[in-house]
Image (cartoon, rainbow, N blue to C red):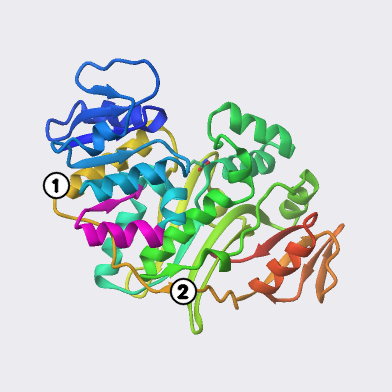
């Protein structure tokens, strides 16, 4: 395989290093605007040098961001090249464009590292779908949020201090809002649900609540009541369709999610045959992420393309009812009071997120026994 590598940052350099040890994967050209030279690849500054190189069969996008990553990937597909990317925002935002285009052009497209970094999660969904119906997917998909919540819970840090530490350790995205407001997890659960259920979710119908409003007092409240707060994504097949959402969630102490430390991910599928299976590991970082990028290249050599058929556009229904911890102005029915906060009577996910949109200063966390 002759590869055109777009980007030479954290992931790109990792991919280059791993490929250097694998004779079947030759990085022929690297698109990089910095003045670097590499022993066995040509460094180019113009995407046309890769698009128009007929000896390159596969393009690895490791630039991140939406633009120009989208234009570069689209052009590579048009030029008949297979695509591997770790860019969840790119695939989630342009799913309806890129996946059908790749199929129409007869090229392969994979993005395993986009969800779970080094965990082979999307590949596992593909395997799971061969023999069973997947009922539910989700879990802890963002290492930055888990690091912050874990530091607040176990070490008693305040939110700002924990965020600063996560940034210092390089876990957070360039703009931490993407992590702490749950957008990174939102991209990941949309992509996971599309592949698990064979649909193309209307992202406007997938609500997201982040962790930026949580306080040390909230965390003390959770501990006193036997819970640990995690940012949990859920994609669930229901009688009416699919419920897909991201929200802080109170996991019982002793549950697998509650035990996830530091910046680790724990992602779970529930299948009608396998029942619950969870996957734990590093959801980010140079070599874990590059590992799955390289695995995708190896899947191409084994003849595999995208994980599933491109499915119909689908709106999430979010009719599941849950009890919520709410601090900040809840005016609905109340089951209990926890200090300054309340526990609501069960309310649908869509109703709670509509209420939160009207009360942006409030903090909510669902109470759930599992993902
Ligand atoms: N910022 C992300 C995280 C990186 O913290 O999990 C991987 O998507």
**Range shown magenta:** 95-112
**Residue 102 included in the magenta stretch of the image:** yes
Of residue 97 and residue 128, the one placed in the foreground of this image is 97
- Which residue shows up at 61% across the image and 66% down it? 368
Q: On the rendered structure, is 66 left or right of 176?
A: left
- Decide: few, some or many residues near mark 1? Use Cα within 10 Å; few <14, some 14-19, many ≥20: few
Residue 139 spot, x, y in % from top left? 50, 57
- Which residue shows up at 12% across the image and 35% down it? 24
State how far apart marks 2 and 1 are (Cα).
Answer: 32 Å
**Residue 244 included in the magenta stretch of the image:** no
Please determine whether, in this image, residue 103 is positioned above or below residue 230.
below
- Which residue shows up at 39% across the image and 23% down it? 33
Please determine whether, in this image, residue 322 is positioned above or below residue 212.
below
Residue 256 spot, x, y in % from top left? 51, 55
Specify the label residue 301 is tagged with: 1
Screen quadrant of the N terminus? top left
The residue lying furthest to the bottom in this view is: 239
Query: Which of pointers 2 and 1 lies earlier in the amino acid sequence?
Result: 1
- Decide: few, some or many residues near mark 2? Use Cα within 10 Å; few <14, some 14-19, many ≥20: some
Q: Does the Cβ of the disc 1 residue fall within 8 Å of ligand 1? A: no
Of residue 275 and residue 104, the one placed in the foreground of this image is 104
Which residue matches tag 2? 314
- Mark 2: which secondary structure? strand
Residue 362 appears in the picture as rendered: yes
Q: Quadrant of residue 195?
A: bottom left
């Amino acid at each position: 395989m002759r590869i055109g590598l777009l980007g030479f940052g954290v992931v790109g350099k990792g991919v280059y290093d791993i490929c250097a040890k694998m004779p079947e994967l030759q990085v022929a050209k690297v698109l990089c605007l910095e003045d670097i030279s590499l022993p066995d690849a040509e460094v180019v500054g113009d995407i046309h040098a890769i698009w128009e190189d007929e000896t390159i069969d596969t393009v690895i996008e490791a630039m991140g961001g939406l633009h120009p990553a989208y234009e570069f990937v689209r052009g590579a597909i048009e030029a008949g090249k297979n695509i591997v990317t770790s860019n969840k925002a790119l695939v989630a935002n342009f799913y309806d464009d890129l996946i059908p285009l790749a199929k129409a052009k007869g090229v392969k497209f994979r993005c395993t590292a986009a969800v779970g970094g080094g965990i082979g999660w999307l590949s596992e969904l593909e395997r799971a779908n061969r023999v069973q119906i997947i009922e539910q997917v989700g879990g802890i998909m963002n290492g930055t949020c888990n690091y912050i919540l874990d530091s607040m819970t176990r070490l008693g840090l305040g939110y700002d201090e924990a965020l600063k530490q996560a940034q210092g350790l390089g876990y957070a995205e360039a703009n931490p809002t993407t992590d702490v407001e749950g957008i990174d997890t939102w991209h990941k659960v949309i992509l996971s649900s599309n592949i698990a259920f064979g649909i193309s979710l209307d992202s406007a119908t997938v609500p997201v609540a982040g962790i930026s409003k949580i306080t040390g007092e909230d965390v003390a409240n959770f501990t006193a009541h036997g819970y640990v707060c995690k940012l949990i994504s859920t994609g669930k097949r229901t009688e009416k369709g699919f419920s897909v959402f991201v929200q802080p969630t109170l996991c019982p102490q002793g549950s697998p999610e509650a035990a996830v430390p530091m910046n680790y991910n724990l992602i779970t599928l529930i299948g009608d045959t396998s029942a619950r299976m969870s996957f734990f590991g590093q959801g980010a970082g140079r070599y874990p992420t590059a590992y799955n990028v390289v695995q995708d290249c190896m899947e191409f050599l084994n003849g595999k393309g995208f994980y599933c058929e491109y499915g119909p556009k689908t709106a999430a229904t979010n009719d599941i009812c849950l009890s919520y911890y709410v601090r900040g102005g809840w005016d609905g029915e109340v089951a209990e009071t926890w200090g300054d906060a309340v526990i609501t009577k069960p309310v649908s996910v869509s109703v709670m997120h509509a209420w939160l949109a009207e009360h942006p200063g409030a903090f909510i966390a669902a109470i759930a026994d599992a993902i």
